[in-house]
Image (cartoon, grey):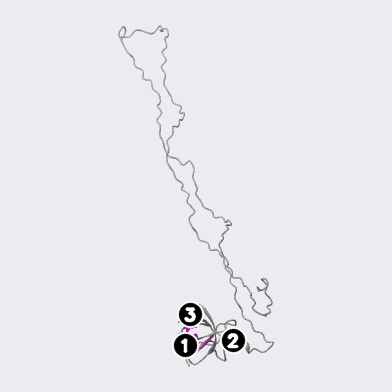
């Protein structure tokens, strides 16, 4: 018997990811999948419908709807040793059996990524302004004085001739020269700081409602009394 590695207790999933139940029996040409304690119908799947076995999970080539249709044709409620309903009814008095129903809710988690919040530009540009400096300069002045002639003074050959005497007068001129000098430096740096930011989103949560039908006693409902 080639069971493709399928064993009892393995979880079975359909090709669309639906959890169908657990393997409760491995027959000659098919496996029996028990849907659960509250469902009176088991599923039958052929070994040739097994696509893969990964760990303790069996992946079928069929969807959940296809498997239910196939099981209905093969015999509704069939399972090794009797149907689920028969096994439940055959429990000894005083014994107990339980099933776990997961109640799921979404929770928020945060991931961070760097994004550009903006930028800072530092630009240089040249402007022109008029500036004055005070520079000491030297300037020659001409003084003309008259004084009585001395006894030794004699007229020369140029006496009674027109004559012009030129005396150059000099002064310093200011020549402006410019050169660039470093007046100051601008340092640009970045620092990182942390702040708290609130983030919110809508989450879903499953609620459990317990209903009674007939004369049934239900205990341990911690979210309110069962609805009548």
Where is residue 51 drawn, in percent x and y?
45, 83
Q: Which residue is mark 3?
A: 65
- The reply to whether residue 53 is in sight is no
Confirm whether the magenta stretch covers residue 115: no
Which percent across, then down, holds residue 220? 68, 76
Left or right of 163: which side holds 120? Answer: right
Task: Name above or below for residue 213 compared with residue 112.
Answer: below
Q: Dot 1 corresponds to which residue?
A: 47
The magenta stretch is: 64-76
Examine the rendering and report whether any part of residue 86 can be seen.
yes
Q: What residue sits right under mark 2 in the picture?
A: 85
Find numbered disc 2 in the image and state the secondary structure of the residue it sits on. helix
Q: Quadrant of residue 104?
A: bottom right
Q: Nearer the viewer, residue 56 or 209?
A: 209
Q: Is residue 178 above or below residue 28?
A: above
- N-term-proximal mark, 1 vs 2: 1
Query: Residue 223 or 19: which is nearer the viewer?
Result: 223
Q: Secondary structure at mark 3?
A: helix
Tell me if 219 is positioned left or right of 76 in this view: right
Frontmost residue, 125 versus 25: 25
Element assignment for label 1: helix
66 relative to 171, above or below = below
Q: Residue at x 60, y 89 (%)?
A: 86
Distance from the alpha carbon under mark 2 to that under mark 3: 22 Å
Q: Tell me where residue 145 sits by quadrant.
A: top left
């Amino acid at each position: 018997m080639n069971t493709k590695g399928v064993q009892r207790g393995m979880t079975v999933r359909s090709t669309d990811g639906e959890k169908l139940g657990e393997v409760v029996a491995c027959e000659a040409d098919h496996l029996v999948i028990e849907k659960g304690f509250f469902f009176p119908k088991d599923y039958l799947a052929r070994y040739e419908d097994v696509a893969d076995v990964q760990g303790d999970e069996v992946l079928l080539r069929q969807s959940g709807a296809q498997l239910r249709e196939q099981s209905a044709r093969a015999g509704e409620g069939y399972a090794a040793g009797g149907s689920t309903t028969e096994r439940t009814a055959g429990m000894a008095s005083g014994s107990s059996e339980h099933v776990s129903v997961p109640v799921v809710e979404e929770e928020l988690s945060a991931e961070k990524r760097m994004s550009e919040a903006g930028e800072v530009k530092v630009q240089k540009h040249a402007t022109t302004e008029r500036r004055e400096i005070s520079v000491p300069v030297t300037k020659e002045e001409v003084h003309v004085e008259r004084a009585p002639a001395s006894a030794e003074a004699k007229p020369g050959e140029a006496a009674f001739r027109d004559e012009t005497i030129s005396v150059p007068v000099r002064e310093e001129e200011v020549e402006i020269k410019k050169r660039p000098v470093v007046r100051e430096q601008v340092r640009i740096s970045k620092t990182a700081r942390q702040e708290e930011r609130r983030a919110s989103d809508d989450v879903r949560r499953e609620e459990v409602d317990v209903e009674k039908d007939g004369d049934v006693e239900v205990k341990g409902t911690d979210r309110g009394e069962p609805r009548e």
